[in-house]
Amino acid sequence: MQTPSPPVPPPVTFDVVPDVLQVAERAFDRGLCPECYGRLFGRYGHGLTNPERTQRLSHALGRPVPVPSGPCTLCAGAFDRWEVWVARVRAATDGWEYHRFNCGSRWDPERLAREEMLWTEVGTTWGESARSAFNRELGKRVEKLAGADGVIQAPDVVLLADLPTGRLEVTVLPLYVRGRYLKEDRTLPQTRWPCRRCQGRGCDFCGGTGKTYSSSVEEVVAAPFLAASGGEGSRFHGMGREDINARMLGTGRPFVLEVLRPRRRALDLPALESEVNRAAAGRVAVRELAWSDGAEVVRIKEASPTKSYRVVLRGATTDAKVNEALSVVAGRPIAQRTPTRVAHRRADRVRARRILAAHLVESTADRFTIELRAESGTYIKEWVEGDGGRTDPNLSQLVGAPLTVELLDVLEIHDRTG
């Protein structure tokens, strides 16, 4: 196999035309370092560093550009301290794995304003800002130090050099993993549920755990990822959520797991998928794990696919009345006021929803199993029971007898099928 040739750099272009030479003359004795003098022409031509531009201009002027005896009047020596900044990057990122990074810098606003004033005074239209040049040059050195790629989009870490204070700030971006989960355990909420009495701080009511429920789908799925990555926490983003006592079946519910501040990023997703499924066998299973990003979180949250359900209900009615009610319900608008059980955390308003299809599967005495497909956001339990009239019409109303939901399963999230 032939090794690909390295990319050929573009040819150097830097013609010292009269307009450029006039600006060079006006800036000649301004106490600028070679970097800042060359930056006056940073967007003119290409293929040269700013100090190399200064050399070309010195040759064209027939005399060397004076090197300031003290700090540069523009950057105050910021471009002379690369070893210091590289050492700060090395110390600040020690123990953090990253493959893509972005460099930024914070400057004294007065210094940046002074730079723009200088551009006006010498008449350059090709100036490159000190911030832009510093970020680029620091990025080159970090690439060499870490073997990582400097990028604009989707970095693993963001390095911010604060020049006024001399500090380097490191922001570690999350890891995102998408997949689908199935849930058999009727005691698990989707996400960690803080204790309502202590708001997660820990109290006698929750046994000091700070939680209403001992575990959740989020915690079950996140545990192996936090252990493997050294992450400091997680967020779980599902395409909707099922009730705690409902199972999630079929092909599973789409989700994105966000791992916060991971120290290690090169994770073995197939191995972690197997670990989750082994540790949570009979309770939770995940499938189709793949790397993702923050944009997927938005897509997951904004999606509104229809869903199919199986409902086991009880009531003093008959097959005939259930079948009759189900025959007229398909496609009929229903008005659902925010259910009583979630009114403490959701706005009290009326939502228009539809049951798209429904049929009776089996029945024994006063126990009926129905399957249905409904629009996203439909409260199924309330549609069956009525919630004191807050859902209208409801199945209890249509059969003429009180009904209660005994079991509820989500059979499918139709986000990619029919």
Image (cartoon, rainbow, N blue to C red):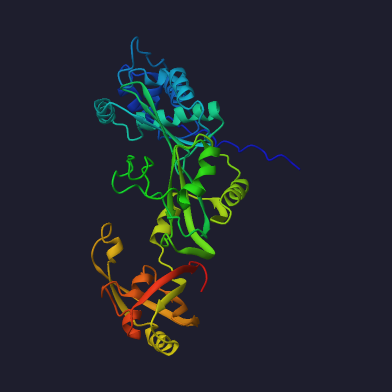
Residue 413 visible (yes or no): no
Q: Is residue 105 above or below residue 179?
A: above
Residue found at the very far right of the displayed protein = 1
Q: Quadrant of residue 121?
A: top left
Foreground residue among 106 and 319: 319
Q: Position of residue 110 (x, y in %)?
A: 24, 26
Foreground residue among 58 and 133: 133
Instruction: Report the label total.
Output: 0
Foreground residue among 200 and 48: 200
Q: Quadrant of residue 205?
A: top left
Horizontal placement of 271 versus 209: left or right?
right
Residue found at the very far top of the displayed protein = 69
Q: Position of residue 123 (x, y in %)?
A: 28, 31
Residue drawn at point x = 33 percent, y = 82 percent: 401
Q: Is residue 178 above or below residue 94?
A: below
Residue drawn at point x = 48 percent, y = 66 percent: 415
Q: Position of residue 177 (x, y in %)?
A: 51, 49
Image quarter of the N terminus: top right
Horizontal placement of 40 versus 414: left or right?
left
Residue 406 visible (yes or no): yes
Residue drawn at point x = 62 percent, y = 46 percent: 271
Q: Is residue 127 above or below residue 346?
A: above
Foreground residue among 114 and 372: 372
